[in-house]
Image (spheres, grey):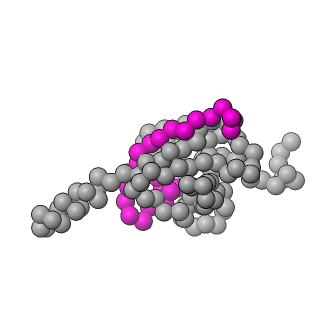
Amino acid sequence: MSQAAQQAAQQLAQQVATLKIWRGSARDAGRFESYEVPFEPGQSVLDGLRWLRINQDPSLALRFSCINANACKECMIELDGETVYACTARLEPRAMTLTPLPNKKLIRDLVTEIAPPSERFK
């Protein structure tokens, strides 16, 4: 491998995504925390969040059922102010702000109440 190719591979291997994530169970009493996660092209935001829970902070609350299939609709969050599915939104080697859905009841961190009222336990 040429020296230029080695340098390019090394730079790619060192890239990180900085996830600024809303933490807490109350919108008016929570806080943002920033985490660096390894970046690889093709990863989803959900991949980064799962890596973060496994390797840095197992207390992070998030909801998902499928991985990269966009079938369950449980991983909806706001990414930089836009509503997205974490399983299909692409992770990027930059600062990314993740917040819970603003129009849903906040449970904790990125988890909001998504079940229709008629399907919730009482």
Viewer-nearest residue: 64 or 6: 6
Q: Position of residue 85 (x, y in %)?
A: 60, 61
Relative to 119, does residue 59 appear above or below in the rendering?
above
| Residue 50 as seen in the image, left or right of residue 70 | left
Residue 22: name its quadrant: top right
Q: Position of residue 118 (x, y in %)?
A: 87, 53
| Residue 115 as seen in the image, left or right of residue 6 | right
Viewer-nearest residue: 83 or 121: 83
Observer able to see residue 64: no
Q: Is 20 part of what is drawn in magenta?
A: no
Relative to 24, does residue 63 appear above or below in the rendering?
below
- Residue at position x 48%, y 63% in the image: 90
**Residue found at the far top of this picture:** 29
Tally of numbered discs: 0
- Residue at position x 71%, y 43% in the image: 106
Q: Position of residue 78 (x, y in %)?
A: 61, 54
Observer able to see residue 92: yes
In magenta, the rendered stretch is: 26-48
Q: Position of residue 97 (x, y in %)?
A: 53, 49
Quadrant assignment for the C terminus: top right
Viewer-nearest residue: 51 or 8: 8
Relative to 10, does residue 20 appear above or below in the rendering?
above
- Residue at position x 61%, y 66% in the image: 70
- Residue at position x 50%, y 45% in the image: 20
Quadrant assignment for the N terminus: bottom left
Q: Is 29 part of what is drawn in magenta?
A: yes
| Residue 13 as seen in the image, left or right of residue 66 | left
